[in-house]
Amino acid sequence: MKSPLLLALGCCLWSAAPLRAQTDIRSSFNGKRILFVHDSDVRPDPNGKRVLFIDGDFLRPDPSGKRLLYVDQDGDIRPDLHGVRLACWDGTELRRTPGGLRLGLVDDKDFRPEPGFKTYFYMDGPPLTRMQLTAVLYLLKPEFFQISPEEKVAKEKEMAKNGAEEDARRGADQFPGEHPILAHSSTAGARRTGSVQITKQGDFYALTLKTGDNPAWQGIGVKVTTAGGDQELWAGIAPAGAVSFGVYGIKGGALSGTWIPVNAAADKSVLGYEVLTGAAQIGGVYKITAGKLPNGGVAYTGAMSIDPLSESLIADAPCYRFRWATGTTALAFRVGDRMAVAAGWGADYEVLRLRLDHADGLGGDFLGKTGAKGSYNLGK
């Protein structure tokens, strides 16, 4: 793993270097100019012909030329988007592999093989971005980005192994279990400590917050897979489980939802449903063309309202409040063409979104009936 300190230093270096920099690359301080870097172009001198073009995260010989190198957000340098790693940036150092052989490093305005050693070249002008520096090295030190056929085969096997492990990790159900609350924040109410117990309950997931609250917060949720392939758990929770949870599919102005009570398991007869029609831009009054309350409740039609809220669970999840003519309310967030909705009948409830956030557990965001919003950081 790359050093967090070096990564932080590297981010400072790259962010401090605007792409519009005009920098002479010289053999040494006061040495002969060997390259000139200006914006996305690398030339032998200011009036010379372009020899390399920086196209975002790609290097090309010219704007319409073939891709020569790709540098991803982690600093890994590859021949193309899915190619093997040829080298990598570790902060201000270029290495063959993370933590491996150092090929060179930025030392103020010099690029050197080692601290205090000879200079590969001197940068006379504003600091270069990571992409600009990679372009210069591609021209002056092409051997940095070449590996033997044997190394390529070994790296391809490693990529395949890592890919299989990642597929297995994504395929495993990591939500069930008792997850300690490592951190909790809320705009209202006390900080929660304790744990969140998640139990597979048929096709659904039962949640119990072991936080010392009386009555304990409980709820029900479903596992979803996002468009990017990530697994998430969407749920509704409330004191004593006084909540139902719904997931709506959105197609234009048509919303079709399934309502899941806290006692839901493999028996689908306890589920409810609701079908709405209204504005394609979510918001306003919607006609209920069909509906049935959970647990064998009555069928119904009528109208209800969906109000967009200014609060968001996260940047890509706009939030809403549902209001039915009966006085029942719900909170919802939208991800893509699906909407998660929690409706409660007590003093408080929350709609909750949990993600496989890091190697050690889950990250979560919530929005509550009383207006509170916040986040969870849960361990394994």
Image: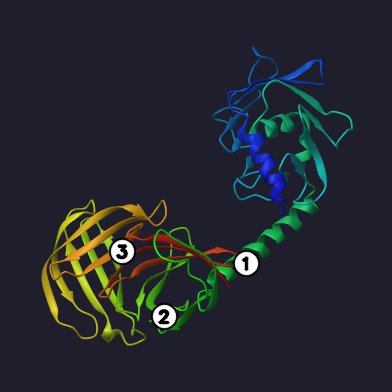
Are the two marked residues, 3 and 2, in contact with CB atoms closer than 8 angstroms?
no
Q: Is residue 85 visible?
A: no
Is 343 rendered above or below residue 66?
below
The residue labelled by disc 1 is 164
- Give the crowd class for mark 2: few <14, some 14-19, many >=20 residues within 10 Å: many
Q: How many marks?
A: 3
The answer to which of marks 1 and 3 sits earlier in the sequence is: 1
Give the CA distance from mark 3 to mark 2.
Answer: 23 Å
Q: Position of residue 339 (x, y in %)?
A: 32, 63
- Give the crowd class for mark 1: few <14, some 14-19, many >=20 residues within 10 Å: few
Nearer-the-camera pick, 298 or 86: 298
The structure residue drawn at horizontal position 71% and vertical position 51%, both measured from the top left corner, is: 2
The structure residue drawn at horizontal position 24% and vertical position 54%, both measured from the top left corner, is: 282
The residue labelled by disc 3 is 370
Answer left or right for 98 relative to 248. Answer: right
Three-letter residue code for mark 2: Ala
The dot on residue 206 is 2
- Quarter of the picture containing the N terminus is bottom right
